[in-house]
Amino acid sequence: LLANIARLRSDMRQAQGIVEKSVGAIEARVSKLQNIFATGFVASGFLMVARQAMEAEQAINRLDAVVRATGNASGYTADQLHSLADAMAAATQFDDEDIRAATASILKFGNVHGETLKRALQLSADYAAFTGTNVTSAAEALGKALSSPAQGIERLQRQIGYLNPAQVEAIKNMQEMGDIAGAQSAVMEILTQKIGGVAEAMNNGYTKAFGDAKKASGEF
């Protein structure tokens, strides 16, 4: 009986040793996996920040290049346009990179200058918020409309709804007489009446909180 008890205790000690070794091996593997995941998260975070920095730099460089290519025809320096983009980003749900891209898009049309450019950028943000598109696509659509106001206002009408026929006809007449600046101003006046201020109005509550957090993460 004593011999059997002794063997049983020996077997139990051996089993305990095996279990402890297994647990130790498992803990070592878990610790290794934790280190791998931690390293992966750090690397992923670094890559995300690096990518955001690269995209921000590209947006700045692209706008600078367009300003040089157009010979400052807009009446604004590159620094002034960057400041305008930052101010618009603070007031809307769109970030400064998107607005810089939108600015470059409008400048490429070559016939939007001075205060008209500033109004066009704000209306691009309003149009994007109203239609649910991005601000760069909105700027492209508005730039086309300002390049050929008579045809452009008809295209925009499909997105913003019914327009007064008399206003549309007046824009056509101004373009035919060569008053492009007047036709552009009339287009923007119609857009201002229909959708002016939408971007700022929509930048509140959860939309603003989430947008501000997203913008802040891109600044690190």
Image (cartoon, rainbow, N blue to C red):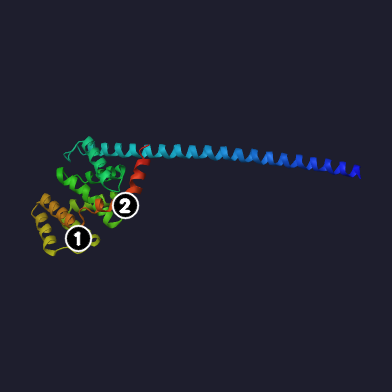
In the image, taking residue 183 as reference, residue 104 lies left or right, namely: right
As drawn, 70 above or below 141: above
Label for residue 154?
A: 1
* Residue 184 screen position, x and y as percent: 14, 52
The amino acid type of the residue labelled 1 equals: Glu
**Residue count near mark 1 (Cα–Cα under 10 Å), binned few <14, some 14–19, many ≥20:** some
Label for residue 176?
A: none
Residue 136 or 83: which is nearer the viewer? 83
Residue 219, picture quadrant: top left
Q: CA distance from mark 1 to mark 2?
A: 34 Å
As drawn, 159 above or below 62: below
Residue 174, picture quadrant: bottom left
Task: Tell me how many marks there are.
Answer: 2
Q: Residue furthest left?
A: 177
* Residue 111 visible somewhere in the drawing: no
Residue 178 or 17: which is nearer the viewer? 17
* Residue 77 screen position, x and y as percent: 20, 36
Q: Residue at x 24, y 42 (%)?
A: 87
In the image, taking residue 29 as reference, residue 210 lies left or right, namely: left
* Residue 29 visible somewhere in the drawing: yes
Q: Which quadrant holds the C terminus? A: top left
The amino acid type of the residue labelled 2 equals: Gly
Look at the numbered disc 1 and give the secondary structure of its residue.
helix
**Residue count near mark 2 (Cα–Cα under 10 Å), binned few <14, some 14–19, many ≥20:** few
Check whether the beta carbons of the residues at disc 1 and disc 2 lie within 8 A of each other. Answer: no
The residue to which callout 2 is attached is: 205
Look at the numbered disc 2 and give the secondary structure of its residue.
helix
Q: Nearer the viewer, mark 1 or mark 2?
A: 2
Q: Earlier in the sequence, mark 1 or mark 2?
A: 1
In the image, taking residue 26 as reference, residue 196 lies left or right, namely: left
* Residue 39 screen position, x and y as percent: 53, 37
